[in-house]
């Protein structure tokens, strides 16, 4: 008998955290997808009100009714999706929503398809659920190669979509999302669509919700990135009632409910003014352009990513290591899957000052 469960012992600590924790003192951190911007004041005020009013106990497992209603209304307004409150589970961030979705859907040996490179949690959570993660190839614009993906869907259990994507910043065209969802659903595959970066799209590009194109789609989202609320741990899952009926059990026993105060804050976020989101979007777009121009001047040429807050730059392994050793934390592409080899992810969710320092240090390293 082994001491630890194989499905846990067999997965690695996240490559991103590893690099972040291994960074030297004074290192500029362009490694974590962590907005440096503060949570907007009206959202904080709602949390303070909830505290003062003593809303500090357990909430219903699936979340407070006001928040589930706000999620239903947000989904209608922004995503053209019709959900009832019974189709929504409020979770501790998108991370927990992804976890309970995988636990609800994936059985031992089930094939789970995900982009390679892709967000680190997908393969780990699929493995923890007993499944077999399989990478899908990206094309030269770092989007899922739809024609190559189609035959792989036959016999798979889950397809994870993430647009705008971490780590590439790629936004899947509407036609690709439609084709993937329709093909997956016809093949009996449930689509799990992680839309946490939906608002961070640039240059008139549109991110579309996968659930617009099929019934068998679980939507994952969070206030984390949209409202600079990563530490509040607030997300949700919305999907077919039969999926929700299974996922709620995992949530109930593993988490009970999302933090009560964060739930009241999330009502203010989703139902309140949205100009803060537009302002953050504009700021990220300006940072993206600044960083792309700076990299270009250093001879690192990257097509401008259309979304999220990451640049996935082609970069030799030894240059990545020199940059990290030289005081700029970035993440080697293979942390996101074998398909990421030869690239590095650079997050521009850091302040402009940090971006300037990072580019200055990179210039010294490259010119040495
Ligand atoms: C694509 C993607 N999904 C989910 C998450 C996790 O979000 P949360 O902080 O809401 O758990 C992240 C965080 O980096 C992410 O990049």
Image: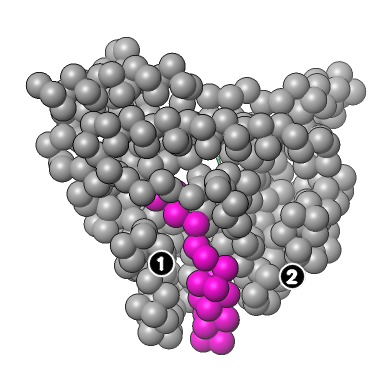
Relative height, residue 121 to residue 57 (above, below): below
Q: Which label is found at residue 256?
A: none
Relative height, residue 349 to residue 151 (above, below): above
Along the line of sight, which residue is nearer the eye, 274 or 4? 274
Q: Quadrant of residue 79?
A: bottom right
Expressed as whole percent of the image width and height from the top left, the position of residue 81 reads 75, 65
Expressed as whole percent of the image width and height from the top left, the position of residue 140 reads 31, 62
Residue numbers of the magenta segment:
166-191
Q: Which label is found at residue 241?
A: 2
Q: Which label is found at residue 144?
A: 1
Q: Residue at x 76, y 38 (%)?
A: 274
Image-based side of 89 in relation to 178, left or right: right
Along the line of sight, which residue is nearer the eye, 153 or 137? 137
Structure colour scheme: one colour
Quadrant containing the N terminus in the rendered view: bottom left
Crowd class of label 2 (few under 14; some 14 to 19; many from 20; radius 10 Å): some
Image-based side of 368 in relation to 351, left or right: left
Quadrant containing the C terminus in the rendered view: top left
Expressed as whole percent of the image width and height from the top left, the position of residue 137 reads 32, 67
Q: Is residue 29 rendered magenta in the image?
A: no
Crowd class of label 1 (few under 14; some 14 to 19; many from 20; radius 10 Å): many
Expressed as whole percent of the image width and height from the top left, the position of residue 136 reads 35, 68
């Amino acid at each position: 008998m082994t001491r630890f469960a194989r499905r846990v012992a067999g997965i690695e600590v996240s490559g991103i955290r590893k690099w972040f924790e291994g960074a030297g003192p004074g290192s500029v951190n362009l490694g974590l997808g962590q907005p440096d911007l503060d949570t907007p004041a009206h959202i904080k005020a709602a949390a303070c009100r909830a505290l003062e009013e003593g809303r500090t106990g357990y909430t219903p497992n699936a979340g407070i009714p006001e928040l589930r209603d706000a999620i239903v209304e947000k989904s209608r307004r922004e995503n053209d999706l019709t959900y009832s409150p019974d189709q929504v589970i409020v979770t501790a961030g998108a991370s927990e929503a992804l976890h309970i979705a995988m636990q609800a859907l994936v059985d031992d040996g089930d094939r789970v398809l995900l982009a390679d490179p892709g967000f680190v949690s997908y393969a780990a959570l699929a493995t923890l659920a007993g499944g077999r993660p399989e990478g899908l190839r990206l094309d030269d614009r770092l989007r899922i190669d739809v024609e190559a993906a189609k035959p792989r869907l036959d016999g798979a259990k889950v397809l994870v979509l993430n647009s705008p994507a971490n780590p590439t910043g790629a936004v899947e065209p509407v036609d690709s999302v439609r084709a993937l969802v329709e093909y997956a659903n016809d093949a009996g595959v449930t689509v799990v669509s992680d839309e946490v970066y939906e608002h961070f799209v640039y240059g008139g590009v549109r991110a579309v919700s996968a659930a617009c194109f099929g019934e068998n789609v679980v939507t994952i989202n969070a206030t984390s990135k949209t409202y600079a609320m990563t530490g509040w741990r607030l997300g949700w899952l919305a999907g077919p009632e039969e999926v929700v009926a299974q996922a709620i059990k995992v949530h109930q026993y593993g988490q009970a409910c999302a933090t009560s105060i964060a739930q009241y804050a999330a009502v203010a976020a989703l139902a309140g003014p949205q100009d803060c989101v537009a302002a953050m979007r504009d700021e990220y777009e300006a940072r993206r352009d600044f960083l792309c121009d700076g990299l270009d001047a250093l001879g690192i040429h990257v097509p401008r990513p259309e979304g999220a807050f990451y640049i996935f730059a082609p970069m030799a392994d030894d240059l990545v290591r020199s940059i990290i050793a030289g005081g700029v934390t970035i993440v080697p592409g293979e942390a996101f899957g074998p398909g990421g080899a030869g690239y590095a992810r650079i997050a521009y969710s850091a302040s402009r000052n940090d971006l300037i320092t990072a580019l200055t240090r990179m210039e010294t390293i490259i010119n040495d």
